[in-house]
Amino acid sequence: MKRYAIHLALRMLLTVLSAVVAGILAISGYDWIAAAVGCIAVWCFVDVLRRATRSVKDMKRLIDGVRFADLNFSFRPAIKKGLPEELARMLDDSLLQFRQKLMQTEADQLFYDTLLQRIDAGIVVLNVEENIEWINKTAVGMFRKPQPRKLSDLKSVSQELPEMLRHLVPRDVKLLTIEKGDISNRFAVTAIFFFAKGKDLKLISFKNIQSALEEHESDAWRKLTGVLTHEIMNSIAPIISLSETLSEPDENRYEVVSRAMQTIHRRSKGLVDFLNNFRQLTRIPEPVPVTFSANEMLADTACLLKADNIVFSFSVTPDDMSITADRALTEQVLINLIKNAWDACRDVPFLNIEIAVFKNEFQRPVITVSDNGYGIIPEALDKIFVPFFTTKPGGSGIGLSICRQIMNLHHGSITVKSEPDKGTIITLRF
């Protein structure tokens, strides 16, 4: 670049000197010599102008190449252009790196586009104007053609779908049923927000969970059938055996008959109690959401349980926090959890049960019930929500199952953290 600048300065100086000398010679009467020197001045000027013009054309070519993404050209040999050799080499090196990065970007884009088009989850990207910025083939196949262009077009799939997607926020999971002919599929719908291309966008994922639900449903029925068969057979077998014994005629066995009848009564009552517990699991009403004060609900619950000598402490942050849910069902969940915590702390010298209500990072209500009881062994943690599973003597094993069903009906969740001899924390997320 320095050599080019020196060369250009010399050409311009030569042009000026030639013009001045030609002028002096013309004034002095040396017309032919003045004309020759003037020609040199004109040639130098034209050469500088030609190089400047070529440089401008080269820059225009570079700008057009960047604008139209066509960078398959070179600035060499520089002598035929208007650029200095060093600048031409730097531009060529930069173009080569730019082409390589562009090719890598295109390859990455093709890879991710192919990946997103081939995954079995439907993906839809919405902008703030509720126009569909991008949609993959799986989602198009789900919604049927023609391809939707905006959120309101999804009314053809379901009248409620646009409204559901409009209010869907991160960590929410909605269930969607789409019917095609005689086939019905259920999808888990989730969303995330992100910023790209200078826009606030919302990515919505539709995951087909029909086969998983059917598999879990079949597994649940197998487990339930096993539990029912086990309990019923445990009651029926001794009843049949005793009935056969009683069918044998004997006038002198009043005491044996009386004891047998008591046993039959006891086992029959146990079977009826078991079936009543099972009915409770299948008869939970649909929630009727209302907005209520968290402080007021906990105060009422504390007053109710005080009659059974059960006490606990609670805190609500902020103090005026409200929850929108079915209050009666929410209280039922809390009462079950508090009673479980009380049972777990019976042998603890300094019993401590605490309830905390607050909002998470998504401004969703969260309730935690913690105790300093004997905790839950790791082998039982994954079974505590299974119906009729219990570690308490005389327990029915349906309390936590009912709690989970109630939270599922609220589209929420219930999770447990526990360590033996360190207590338990149960978290409710609405």
Image (cartoon, rainbow, N blue to C red):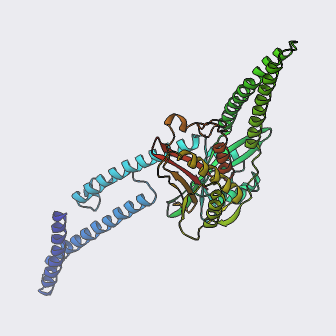
Q: Compared with residue 357, is residue 393 higher up or lower down, i.e. above or below?
A: above
Q: Compared with residue 68, is residue 114 higher up or lower down, i.e. above or below?
A: above
Q: Nearer the viewer, residue 70 or 56?
A: 70
* Whole-percent x, y for residue 256 in the image: 79, 19
* Whole-percent x, y for residue 117 in the image: 58, 43
For residue 315, side relative to residue 206 (left or right): left
Q: Nearer the viewer, residue 3 or 238?
A: 238
Is residue 100 in sight in this rendering? Answer: yes
Q: Nearer the viewer, residue 361 or 331?
A: 331
Q: Residue at x 13, y 76 (%)?
A: 33
Q: Residue furthest bottom?
A: 27
Is residue 357 in sight in this rendering? Answer: no
Q: Residue at x 43, y 49 (%)?
A: 105
Q: Quadrant of the C terminus?
A: bottom right
* Whole-percent x, y for residue 406 in the image: 68, 50
Q: Residue at x 65, y 57 (%)?
A: 307
